[in-house]
Image: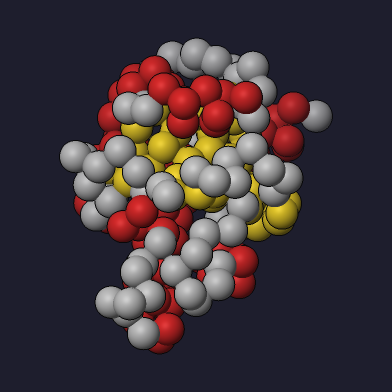
Amino acid sequence: MSCFAGGHLLFKDDPFEGQDTFLFELIKVAAGAGVQVQFGHAICQTFVRDWLGRMADANALPFFVTRSPVEDTSDTLIAPDPFLHPPTDIERVLRASFGAIHQVLARALESTDVHSAMVVFSDSERIDETYVEIAASSIDFVEVCLGGFPRDGSVPTLRIAVSGAGARRYRRNDA
């Protein structure tokens, strides 16, 4: 069984001027946080790209997160092996992983071009099941994720709508 962490960024306009530069910046933020992020057609697994694309709006760009540039799943990022890690260590690993994802989201949501983000967690056996839907701000993202994950190494089917500074500015400018 494989596990996946991904989602999409919802842009005010798609594409927007400077989008490539912006995405390269997010890739650098991810690398600095110790994770790899892939966007759009660069997502390495076709079925993951299709799965994320089915959930996205027209102005959304799918993304996929792994621990390493050479991995094609999120297993080491969000599914620590309970035989190798006691429950307290699993929480530490998850907190670090969600913190890394948060760094990328926080930077993305600082942009006035980004309306919001959706983050999705699933394993390959339940990828098309109904998701538990949760709302979070970019501030409480890590704690919301930790609250939704069991400490046994399994991965729930979660969909987290994330708002942040970019979302607030977008609504204010849209009025």
Q: Residue 15: give x, y in percent of width and height.
A: 50, 13
- Name the foreground residue: 145 vs 54: 54
Q: Residue furthest left?
A: 70
Horizontal side, residue 149 vs residue 159: left or right:
left
Circle count: 0
Q: Is residue 161 above or below residue 150?
A: above
Q: How is the model colour-coded?
A: secondary structure
- Name the foreground residue: 148 vs 165: 148
Q: Is residue 109 above or below residue 148?
A: above
Q: Residue 55: give x, y in percent of width and height.
A: 64, 30
Residue ID at (61%, 66%) = 148
Q: Is residue 120 above or below residue 20?
A: below
Q: Let me know if residue 125 appears in the view.
A: yes
Q: Let me know if residue 168 appears in the view.
A: no
Horizontal side, residue 33 vs residue 1: left or right:
left
- Name the foreground residue: 76 vs 1: 1
Q: Hey, which quadrant is residue 129 in on the image?
A: top right
Q: Residue furthest right?
A: 175
Q: Residue 127: give x, y in percent of width and height.
A: 58, 41
Residue ID at (61%, 19%) = 59
Residue ID at (39%, 18%) = 41
- Name the foreground residue: 129 vs 172: 129
Q: Hey, which quadrant is residue 39 in on the image?
A: top left
Quarter of the picture holding the C terminus: top right
Horizontal side, residue 174 vs residue 15: left or right:
right
Residue ID at (70%, 48%) = 131
